[in-house]
Image (tube, grey):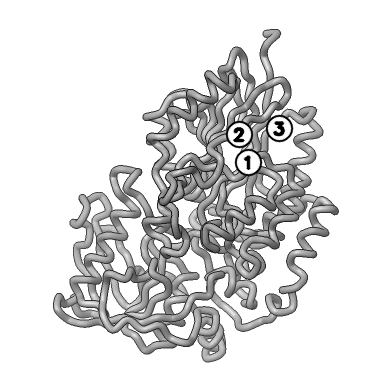
């Protein structure tokens, strides 16, 4: 018992630059309910209280999707977040949407942060050198803790090409065992903590294949795990999104092994007193954009969220605006997971930018009926593949103007049973005009007469609200699992 030591591991994942209090969605009984949560100043309060209570024996890690997701972050390529993040006392992070500004901008952000971005699986194509350090070692409470990072592996596979210019991303499965060996034998660590942005299903499979990780901090898939999952001897946790939650894992370590643990998924409640120093940094970061973002642009009767897999009210709003803007028969966008909900009442510019912070141009394309089927099949495979390593999506692709009846459990290429446009079956060989945003909505390989319009997404959303007194964007049963 003399060698037994304790450590508290705190996790933040997928905060998407939500600096301050925002609406969050919760399930209660058979319905969604909403209440304010989050904000870095409240997170700082929680972290300081935990550190004070355990004599500083605390490790605080961020699994990425941190520097993108709101207008101030997008406008400054993540720079607006740097002073705030540096004030939190983080120990390390990894990355995903951070690549949205291009590798050079992300490299600059990494220099400005006072903690490392870690990734064993991001390589310079020309030199084959690692783009970021693979690991770091922290001395905490008499323990040597080895931190290893795995960035999202889909950046060069499903994201716009400029995200990954000059880089190659691997799964990390081949690189991880040797990193664990280095940490155990050369660095003599007592504990190995993996900071991952692969996603919960991927992390679970990886931890079943690779031994030697004590704690896997999982990100990307926005799981709210109310208790940790034990995969072999590895504890796996994930802690929601938008900075609405912190994961806390209290470990007892003896002889380089975790012998006991306790876990808590902490809601960052609105009633928590914000840390004054961090609160001031948040206000400084938001101040240049406050007037524009607080502008009221419309009203909604529907609660808008991205909290469901097959279809969402928020994306129905976006797709309605795309169709009305272009006159297209169909509309498509990616199944993004990020964006805080908008409750019934006023809609502000801040809400619009949260929905689609990149503000990409509205585009149109003509798709053959068989291309629509192929596109849906590809997306369903990326979402529901039996092999977690083949899952590369967010949620199911967002569609409007069609109804698809699908068998989720079927093998690749056999999931789509029937598709209707209106009351008519989708016809092979027939062209369907479609509106979309970004290559994640409709990839380059599909369609013809592709055109990028001068109107951008935010303008289309605002124009739609101007034409309609109150927004209604209820679920329509676009995808039905049969």
For residue 136, the mark is 2
The residue to which callout 3 is attached is: 58
- Residue 50 placement (x, y as % from top left): 75, 36
- The front one of 156 and 340 is 156
CB atoms of marks 1 and 2 within 8 Å: yes
Mark 3 or mark 2: whose residue is earlier in sequence: 3
Which class describes the residues within 10 Å of circle 2: few (<14), some (14-19), or many (20+)? some
Q: Quadrant of the N terminus?
A: top right
Above or below for 23 versus 300: above
Which class describes the residues within 10 Å of circle 3: few (<14), some (14-19), or many (20+)? many
Any part of residue 199 in sight: no
- The front one of 122 and 303 is 122
The residue to which callout 1 is attached is: 92
- The front one of 67 and 230 is 67
Circle 1 or circle 2, nearest the eye: 2
Measured Cα–Cα span from mark 3 to mark 1:
13 Å
Q: Residue at x 16, y 77 (%)?
A: 427
């Amino acid at each position: 018992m003399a060698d037994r030591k304790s450590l508290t591991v705190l996790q933040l994942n997928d905060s998407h630059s939500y600096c301050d209090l925002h609406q969050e969605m919760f399930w209660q009984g058979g319905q969604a309910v909403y209440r304010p949560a989050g904000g870095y100043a409240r997170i700082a309060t929680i972290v300081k209280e935990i550190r004070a209570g355990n004599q500083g024996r605390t490790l605080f890690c961020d699994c990425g999707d941190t520097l993108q997701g709101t207008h101030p972050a997008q406008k400054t390529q993540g720079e607006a977040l740097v002073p705030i993040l540096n004030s939190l006392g983080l120990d390390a992070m990894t990355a995903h949407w951070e690549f949205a500004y291009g590798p050079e901008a992300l490299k600059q952000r990494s220099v400005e942060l006072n903690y490392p971005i870690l990734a064993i699986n991001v390589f310079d194509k020309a030199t084959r050198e690692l783009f970021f350090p693979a690991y770091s070692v922290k001395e905490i409470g008499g323990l040597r803790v080895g931190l290893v990072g795995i960035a999202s592996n889909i950046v060069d596979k499903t994201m716009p090409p400029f995200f990954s210019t000059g880089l190659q991303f691997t799964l990390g499965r081949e690189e991880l065992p040797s990193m664990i060996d280095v940490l155990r034998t050369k660095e003599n660590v007592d504990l190995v903590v993996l900071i991952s942005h692969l996603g919960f299903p991927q992390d679970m499979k990886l931890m079943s294949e690779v031994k030697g990780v004590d704690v896997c901090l999982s990100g990307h898939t926005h799981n709210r795990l109310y208790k940790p999952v034990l995969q072999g001897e590895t504890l796996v946790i994930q802690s929601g999104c938008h900075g609405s939650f912190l994961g806390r894992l209290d470990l007892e370590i003896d002889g380089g092994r975790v012998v006991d643990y306790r876990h808590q998924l902490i809601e960052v409640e609105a009633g928590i007193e914000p840390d004054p120093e961090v609160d001031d940094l948040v206000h400084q970061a938001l101040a240049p954009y406050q007037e524009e973002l607080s502008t009221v642009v419309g009203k909604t009767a529907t609660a808008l969220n991205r909290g469901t897999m097959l279809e969402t009210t928020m994306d129905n709003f976006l797709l309605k605006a795309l169709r009305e803007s272009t006159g297209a028969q169909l509309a498509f966008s990616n199944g993004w997971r990020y964006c805080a909900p908008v409750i019934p009442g006023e809609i502000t510019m801040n809400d619009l930018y949260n929905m689609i912070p990149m503000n990409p141009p509205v585009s149109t394309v003509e798709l053959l009926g068989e291309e629509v089927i192929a596109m849906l099949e590809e997306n369903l495979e990326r979402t529901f593949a039996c092999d977690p390593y083949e899952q590369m999506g967010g949620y199911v692709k967002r569609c409007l103007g069609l109804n698809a009846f699908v068998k989720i459990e079927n093998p690749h290429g056999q999931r789509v049973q029937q598709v209707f446009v209106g009351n008519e079956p989708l016809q092979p060989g027939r062209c369907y005009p479609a509106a979309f945003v970004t290559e994640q909505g409709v990839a380059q390989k599909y369609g013809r007469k592709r055109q990028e319009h001068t109107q951008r997404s935010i303008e289309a959303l605002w124009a739609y609200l101007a034409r309609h007194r109150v927004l209604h964007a209820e679920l329509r049963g676009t995808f039905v699992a049969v």
